[in-house]
Amino acid sequence: MGNIVAIVGRPNVGKSTLFNRLIGERQAIIDDESGVTRDRQYGNSFWNGKNFTVVDTGGFVRNSDDIFEAAIRSQVRIAIEEATILIFMVDVSTGLTDLDEQVAGMLRRTEKPVLLAVNKVDNSQRQLEANEFWSLGFEQTFFLSSITGGGTGDLLDAAVEYIEEEEEDDSDIPRLAIVGQPNVGKSSLTNALLGEERNIVTDIAGTTRDSIHTHYNKFGKEFLLVDTAGIRKKSKVHEDLEFYSVMRAIKAIDESDVVILMIDATLGVESQDMAIFRLIQKRNKGVVILINKWDLMEKETNTARDYEKEVRRRIEPFDDVPIVFVSAVEKQRIFKAVETALEVYSNRSRRISTSELNDKMLTSIDRYGPPAHRGRLPKIKYVTQLPIAYPAFAFFCNNPKHIKDSYKQYLENQLRYHFDFSGIPISIFFRKK
């Protein structure tokens, strides 16, 4: 679980172009419009029926032209530790460099699958020159054309061979993850919850080699706290690396049911928070937003109400999310945070009977039907909930393709109005009757 494909290599070999291709240009454009982040670093990809997260290590370096070799080496080291599959990119137009050789040396020592992608093989001359890269000794070597995107499909076919399909975990214990930027207070919250009395909690090995889940069971509450190893590891080397914390967050999101996204009250919602929020949403996980360090803000004039309004504005259109103001250090309202996360967990597993669903939703549809497409009115006859781990609904209608996104949003709002799905992304599909 938590399959991460990391793209590594020195600057300017075309890592971000490949990244954009893998997560789909459309997604990149959408993110730009919603101002998520100019330098996107990770996103969701889907290939041959498998979901995985792509991480572009280059995106983590500001002004990457003058990036020194030590920084690249430390990124490659983290990628080797944390990723499932590594794509090592080189550029035929500059040939083999010393830095390529150094990175190759590091990658040859890992047990994990490494795919070598030789980029900019755009003509027959370069096709010949690209052969020198076989000398790096990677059995899986692919030639890509950056101009046409040729070769990407073969590379992906090979990569997803290594991806295990995710098993839906059927244990009834809710899995909660705490994520957020470095220094937002994740360790303080974890320590406040678990306390130092280790006797009430037991560590259980997670699905990734070095993640530890902690079983919490007291005050009548029981849950697994995902990846406490990553949160409590106070190794200074990794602590400041945004890259490291993002890799950990992606894994934790994948291994949980509900994600507690911590935001630093003094900084407000930043683009990195938004990127993590969208990832939680795409992965169909429950989410609770915790505004931490609120004790530092209370002396200011802003009220929690105004602050909350602003946060909701940022996360639109999916703004039906619980927001809790806490102070992990002062232990204020941290128990409220857990209770809220457990409520969201029960929302995620909510099943609505077909009769009740049709009763409520068809009334909403009668009141305001789908707009006409070229003079024809799409008609929705029937709705049912799909039997999967998160809320997803199929609306059966005569011509599914003609239903506009704005109407889909209306249906989602109506579902939220009639049934409690607070903190849960809802999937809506239109099917031909």
Image (spheres, rainbow, N blue to C red):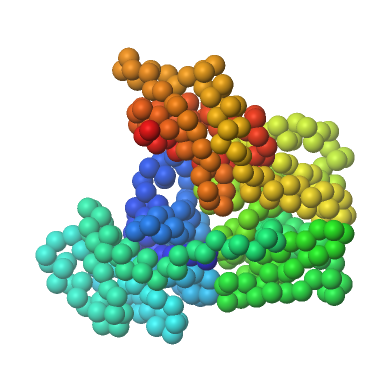
Quick check: 363 left or right of 17?
right
Image point 41% across, 45% down: which residue?
28
In-front residue for pair 33/380 = 380
Residue 129 location, quadrant: bottom left
Nearer-the-camera pick, 207 or 122: 207
The residue that appears at 36% across and 69% down in the rendered structure is: 161
214 relative to 4 in the view: left or right: right
Q: Residue furthest bottom?
A: 109
Residue 378 in picture, x, y percent from top left: 38, 23
Q: Is residue 276 visible?
A: no
Q: Residue furthest top?
A: 375
Extreme residue in the left direction: 124
Q: Position of residue 207 (x, y in %)?
A: 58, 72
How many labels sit on residues? 0
Left/right placement of residue 426 relative to residue 175 reads left
**Residue 198: x percent and y percent?**
83, 74
Name the foreground residue: 116 vs 121: 116
Q: Quadrant of the C terminus?
A: top left
* Observer-nearest of 56 and 382: 382
Quadrant in the picture for residue 308: top right
**Which residue sits at x=40%, y=55%?**
46
On screen, residue 194 versus residue 66, left or right, reads right
Q: Position of residue 184 (x, y in %)?
A: 71, 55
7 to 365, vertically: above or below? below
Residue ID at (44%, 21%)? 370
Q: Is residue 386 visible?
A: yes
